[in-house]
Image: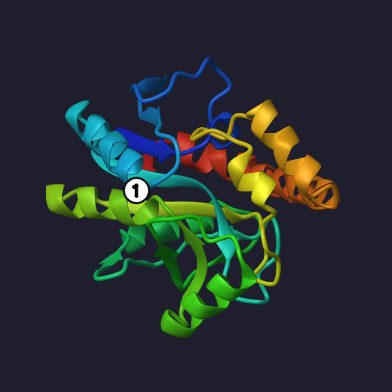
């Protein structure tokens, strides 16, 4: 093992705060420590790709996709940690750095689930969409929107990468429209849009409260993983 400088791409402010207690800025490189740099990219593959390229330009030795995911396998539950071995895209598959992944898994006192992670271009918020994706990608434990772009940038540059994702919504749960329409790209609440959504669908308030509790479970898991990543060690 030796010390490397790592670059973390994270979509949401809340996910970033599980790793970094300092001030956050969007779309710029933030130094968490001498060995760890971070970019809060916002949601989606285009933003994640730009963030990954910024980190490579800053001189990092490897990339990390950090954050939350939706579950595709029915047995996965909120707070479960996904450390996939492969990332599935629509037309390509990427392998993570397996020794690095193993080192992270060994640093934990709780299980981390292997297999694959599906990375898509648009939010996957319905049970029907999750079921369809699972039919096409039966080895995928979960789904996100950023890991494929990060994997593509890392692979093109010849750099190692890993994916660290904690489950928020289980496979059998659809996301309320207010959850996706009431936040900005970084997960910040857009109060007027959220209120309009709740006025149209008042019952969604209960769903949002449940989703918020699930998000807290996912963030708790990420906080537990953070020390192993902050050590800045790669096999």
Q: Residue furthest front?
A: 200
Q: Residue at x 40, y 61 (%)?
A: 119
> Which class describes the residues within 10 Å of circle 1: few (<14), some (14-19), or many (20+)?
many
Let me know if residue 29 appears in the view. yes
Q: Is residue 37 above or below residue 167?
A: above
The picture places residue 12, in percent across and down from the top left corner, at 52, 36
Left or right relative to 144: residue 211? right
Q: Residue furthest top?
A: 23
The picture places residue 75, in percent across and down from the top left corner, at 68, 76
Q: Residue at x 76, y 46 (%)?
A: 200
Q: Residue furthest left?
A: 157
Q: Where is residue 117, by image quadrant? A: bottom left
Out of 2 and 88, give the one closest to the viewer.
88
Coloring applied to the structure: rainbow
Q: Is residue 217 above or below residue 133?
A: above
Out of 200 and 64, give the one closest to the viewer.
200
Number of marks present in the image shown: 1
Q: Is residue 46 above or below residue 156?
A: above
Out of 211 and 129, give the one closest to the viewer.
129
The picture places residue 214, in percent across and down from the top left corner, at 74, 51
The residue where tag 1 is placed is: 45
Out of 169 and 101, give the one closest to the viewer.
169
Let me know if residue 221 appears in the view. no
Q: Secondary structure at mark 1?
A: helix
Left or right relative to 82: residue 9? left
The picture places residue 66, in percent across and down from the top left corner, at 47, 45
Left or right relative to 89: residue 115? right
Q: Residue at x 48, y 52 (%)?
A: 164
Q: Residue at x 28, y 43 (%)?
A: 49
């Amino acid at each position: 093992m030796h010390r490397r400088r790592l670059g973390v791409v994270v979509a949401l402010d809340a996910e970033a705060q599980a790793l970094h207690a300092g001030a956050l800025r969007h779309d710029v490189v933030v130094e968490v420590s001498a060995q760890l740099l971070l970019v809060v990219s916002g949601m989606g593959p285009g933003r994640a790709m730009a963030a990954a390229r910024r980190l490579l330009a800053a001189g990092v030795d490897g990339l990390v996709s950090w954050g939350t995911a939706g579950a595709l396998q029915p047995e996965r539950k909120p707070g479960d940690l996904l450390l996939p071995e492969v990332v599935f895209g629509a037309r390509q598959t990427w392998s993570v750095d397996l020794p690095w992944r193993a080192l992270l898994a060994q640093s934990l006192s709780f299980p981390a689930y292997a297999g694959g992670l599906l990375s898509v271009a648009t939010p996957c918020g319905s049970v029907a969409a999750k079921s369809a994706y699972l039919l096409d990608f039966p080895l995928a434990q979960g789904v996100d929107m950023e890991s494929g772009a990060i994997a593509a940038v890392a692979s093109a540059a010849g750099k190692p990468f890993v994916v660290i994702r904690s489950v928020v919504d289980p496979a059998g749960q659809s996301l309320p429209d207010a959850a996706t329409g009431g936040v900005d790209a970084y997960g910040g609440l857009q109060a007027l849009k959220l209120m309009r959504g709740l006025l149209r669908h008042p019952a969604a308030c209960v769903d949002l409260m449940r989703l918020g509790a699930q998000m807290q479970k996912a963030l708790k898991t990420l906080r537990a993983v953070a020390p192993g990543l902050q050590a800045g060690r790669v096999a």
